[in-house]
Image (spheres, rainbow, N blue to C red):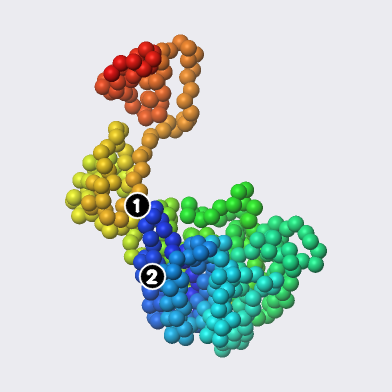
Amino acid sequence: MKLFHISDLHLGKRVYEFSMLKDQKYILQQILDLAKEYQPDGILISGDVYDKSIPPVEAVTLLDDFLTQCKAQNIAVYLISGNHDSAGRLDFGSRILEQQQIYICGAFGGALYHVQQEDIFGEIHFYLLPFLKPAMLSPYQKEEKTLSYMQAVQYVLEQVHIDKTKRNVLLAHQFVTWKGEVLRSDSETRSLGGVDEMDASLFFDFDYVALGHLHRSQKIGRDFIRYAGSPICYSFSEIRQKKGLTMVELKEKENVEITFLPLQPLHEMIELKGTLSQLLEAAEHTGGSTSYVRAVLTDANAVLDPVGKLRQYYPNLMTVERHIQRSEKEDSFALQEQPQEFSFFELFTKFYEKQNEYSLTQEQEALVQKLWEQCEKGGEGE
């Protein structure tokens, strides 16, 4: 059986107030085109289908269109909720959709959602575990105990008799690491102190574990325990990541082939760095770009309307930031001498040099001296 593993679609997401809906529609169509080429039997969607618990109508329509086209290609869909989703809303119509081989598990119902399928090698068991918090187990525990995230997931798995002679697939949306190690991105939701962390060893009984939650495609501990990652970049910390989907081919027991299929975005995310004049000169030479852009300006002094000037060449400029050079030795400002030995002007100039690694100009020195003299006079003057 051949499967596509995707996750963290975040339909309806906005990045720096830019709607990503067109980019998401483009990438979902690309996934459907790859499905026509590779003809998978099923698509695993491992949570964070939407970006908000109440998604915009356009995002709901986009998912509806995608599922409809999956059905048209006779592809089964296995879908779970993530921490960004409203589990109850995602469950709407799920019992009817089962008849169309679209299996949705939004809210945890006390046990793993189970679907049994067959191929030429025999039975395949799919287990769907939506995003789970320990508190969600309270109505189903015989004895009320305070559990960690890892203990909660372990408890749920222990309630199921998994036939290890058969092939078993698990969908889960949790923060899974291998001995505490994992690669993260800035666009992911983080919990204080890693309280939601759990070890990949929990899932060793499965033949393939389709994880969602982290946006970087990666294996966790074993080749068969994998994050698909988000299909497009949702932060500039992800621009060096390879985005795509994971194709999984389950043959006979213990024979699993995994292939990464790259996806090409509608708009690349790029970072530009330099002075405003350097960036504008380069843009004139290249003609600019429709990529999503983060511009980091290294100008020593303030510049006039950098956003307006850059957007003439980069209409999808998302953010402009200033780069402030800092000493590699220390970030804090400290003097070896006693501060009272210096005048205000000397203290200010030393602080300025520490922060910026260059001195005040003569004009700036004159302005600082003038402002201080006015302060000493009680603000009188021009």
Name the one closer to the observer, 348 or 171: 348
Look at the numbered disc 2 and give the secondary structure of its residue.
helix
Q: In the rendered image, which quarter is residue 382 located in?
A: top left
Q: In the rendered image, which quarter is residue 224 located in?
A: bottom right
The residue to which callout 1 is attached is: 318
Q: Residue furthest top?
A: 341
Is 235 placed left or right of 121 in the picture? left
In the image, what residue occupies the spot 38% across and 25% down?
A: 352
Q: As shown in the figure, which amino acid type bears the numbered disc 1?
A: Met
Look at the numbered disc 1 and give the secondary structure of its residue.
strand
The residue to which callout 2 is attached is: 25
In the image, what residue occupies the spot 27% across and 43% down?
A: 306
* Horizontal and vertical percent position of residue 301: 29, 32
Name the one closer to the observer, 25 or 87: 87
* Horizontal and vertical percent position of residue 359: 33, 24
* Horizontal and vertical percent position of residue 249: 52, 78
* Horizontal and vertical percent position of residue 269: 35, 56
In the image, what residue occupies the spot 41% across and 26% down?
A: 354
Q: As shown in the figure, which amino acid type bears the numbered disc 2?
A: Lys
Residue 368 at least partly seen: yes
- The label on residue 333 is none
Name the one closer to the observer, 181 or 154: 154
